[in-house]
Amino acid sequence: MNLYRHKEWAAYRAEQIRLHGGVCAHCLRSGNEVVLQVHHRDYVAGRLPWEYPYEECEVLCRGCHAKEHGVIKPSKDWVLIGHDDLGGLDGECEQCGQALRYAHMVFHPKWWAMVVGEKCCDDLTEGTVGTESHAEFLNFLDRRKRFVGSNKWQAESDGSLSIRRSGIAILIVSTAPGQFRFHLDEVRGKVDHQTMLEAKIRAFDFVESGKAAAYLAERRQKAKSARHRSS
C-alpha cells in the first residue's frame, strides 16, 4: 500500500505547503517553479506520514529534498520502462510538476522509478524516446479503441461476442452476472473481468503484444508432443 496516495496525506501535504508559504525552505523557489515535497526531519516507527506535528516537517523542492537525504538525482542514463493513460489530467510529472494524462515511467538504477511527461522523458533519456514512444502509445490506444468498438464483432446465439484479430479467434463470454472471460481459438480463458469492455481490452492487449500467438503456439506444440509420445 502506498501511504502517499491517501487522501489524508494529500490534505496534510497541501496544508504544510500553505503553512510554509508555498516555497522551498532552502532555495526559496516556489511551487510554480519546482515540485514541492514535505520532508520529515525524523521518522517514528508506527507513525503515519500525516501524523507528524507541523513543526517536525519542512517543505523542500525535490532537489533540496534529495540533498537533505544525501541523494542527488542523476541527470542522465534514465531508461523508459512503461506508459499509462490516466484518462484525464490526473497525474503529475515528478520532474517538473506539470499535470499529466499520458504518463511515462522512467528508471535509473541509482535512483528509482519516476513518472514523467513526454518532454521530461526525452530530457532524462537524452534522446527522443519519450516523443517517439508517446506517438507509438497514442497509436496503440487508437487501435485498441477501434478494436473494442469495431462493427466486426459478431453476436452469438448465447449472447457471447466473437471476432478475429491477427489470425486468432477471440470469443468473449459471460460466466456469471458481471463476469466476462475471453477465449482464444481452442483455449478457454480462466480469468474473469468485471465488464465486457474490460474483457475486450485485455484480449486486445494480449493479442497485440504477441503473447497470445506465442502462448497458443506453445500449447499446440505441447499437445503435438504428447500425441507423439502416446502413439
Image (spheres, rainbow, N blue to C red):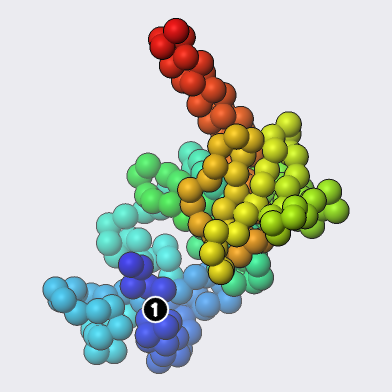
Residue 227 drawn at (x, y percent): 47, 14
> Can residue 61 be seen by looking at this rendering?
yes
Q: Dot 1: within a 10 Å radius of its alpha carbon, few (fewer than 14), some, or many (20 or more) residues? A: few
Residue with the mark numbered 1:
6
Report helix, strand or loop for mark 1: loop
- Please tell me which residue is depicted at 28% across the width and 78% down the height of the picture: 49
Is 5 situated left or right of 82 in this image?
Answer: left
Residue 45 drawn at (x, y percent): 14, 73
- Please tell me which residue is depicted at 61% across the width and 65% down the height of the picture: 195
Residue extending farthest to the right is 151
- Say if 180 sits above or below 29 in the image: above
- Please tell me which residue is depicted at 42% across the width and 83% down the height of the picture: 7
Residue 78 drawn at (x, y percent): 49, 43
Quadrant of the image for the N terminus? Answer: bottom left
- Please tell me which residue is depicted at 32% across the width and 55% down the height of the picture: 71
> Can residue 13 be seen by looking at this rendering?
no
- The image quadrant of residue 231 is top left
Front-most of residues 19 and 181: 181
Front-most of residues 29 and 184: 184
